Amino acid sequence: MIPFSGSPLNRASEKRIDQNWIESKRRDSSSLILPIWKLEPMLLGSEKADPPVSLGLVHPEVVDSLAEPDAPCVFLGLDGDVAVFALDIAAAKDPANEGPLAGLGYFRDARVAAQMVSLKAAAIIAQAKAIVDWHQRHGFCPKCGTPTKLMDAGYRRLCGKCNSEHFPRVDPVVIMLATHGEACLVGRGKLFPPGMFSALAGFIEPGETIEEAVRRELMEEASVKVGAVRYYATQPWPFPSSLMIGCFADAVSRDVKADETELAEVRWIERRAARELVEGKAVEGIRVPPPIAIAHHLIKAFALDLKA
């Protein structure tokens, strides 16, 4: 399973418009809340504990005092009969060391936290982080500039002046591995650490299909012409809120040239080298992303000849 996917929660989207039900669950002492502080989810236990660690789900009465009255509280779904919410406590000064959460756990960047918990918990982190982030960015109506109000348990914002409705958005991104025979193409972004290479990626533009975006991005970034494009898998990527659409593309040749405005280098790596790279080994001074990233899984699928 690719990290950030496979949530164990029933999103129960039909319940979002039932304000009485949401409010009753929000006050229910059996419900669970994931505190999000400065977009970092809470983890339970000691910072010195070895992973996997538990997600910082606490009961409402433990965390309510840390949130401002209008702080986003989002219904994530049901775990059986238990309602699970995410609560933005960005206004708290130092919740891990002061107040009701002190001594219960700590907060970590979502990328780091996702690698410390189970895959199911990582999927909850993805949903919570992305939607709390959206609320922080969309407090005002883009049409008239008036403050908007949270609606539908966190899945809609409504402008009080022009009545415009705004919904959480997900930006589609193609991430693709061009292949030619026994080699695949990887690139190093200018902001990447030295030696770090990954699959190439780019946002899908308006009026563009997935296949068209794959072909355009490979041509723009590496001057690679490709034929067939095949879908492999997707990954929710909550930074801030994208859907990574993983694909393979058949390159016509190995002629490449990096677009120097975006990439520092592109290179072909042979399948045997790809196998060692996904095992965490450095080959010829290069490394590839860890398993948290779909790029790792694309390279692994190629290395093991599992691609579609």
Image (cartoon, rainbow, N blue to C red):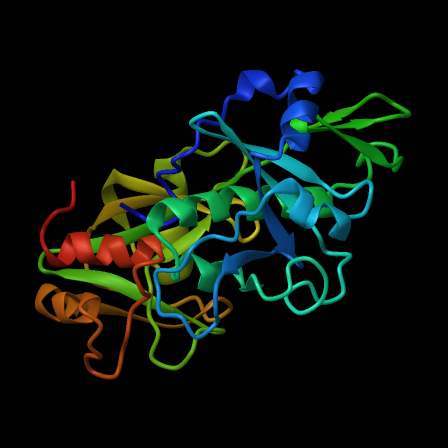
Q: From the top left corner, tell me how far across and down residue 159 is, in percent.
A: 83, 27
Give percent across and percent down for residue 196: 35, 74
Count the marks: 0
Between 172 and 229, the one lying in front of the other is 172
Query: Relative to 66, is 145 on the left or the right?
Result: right
What residue lies at 38% left-to-right and 68% top-to-bottom?
Answer: 258
Percent coordinates x, y for residue 101 in the rendering: 64, 59
Q: Nearer the viewer, residue 252 or 266?
A: 266
Residue at position x 70%, y 42% from top?
A: 135
In the picture, residue 48 is in which quadrant?
A: bottom left
Dividing the picture into quadrants, the one containing residue 235 is top left
Q: Is residue 190 left or right of residue 22?
A: left
Which image quarter is the N terminus in? Answer: top left
Measured along the vertical axis of the image, is residue 57 above or below residue 117?
above
Q: Residue at x 82, y 42 (%)?
A: 69
Compared with 38, 5 (above or below) is: above
For the C terminus, which image quadrant?
top left
Q: Residue at x 35, y 69 (%)?
A: 50
Q: Residue 244's x, y, as percent? A: 41, 45
- In the image, is residue 212 above or below residue 164? below
Question: Left or right: where does residue 144 sit relative to residue 59?
Answer: right
Q: Is residue 210 above or below residue 226?
A: above
Can residue 152 be seen by looking at this rendering?
no
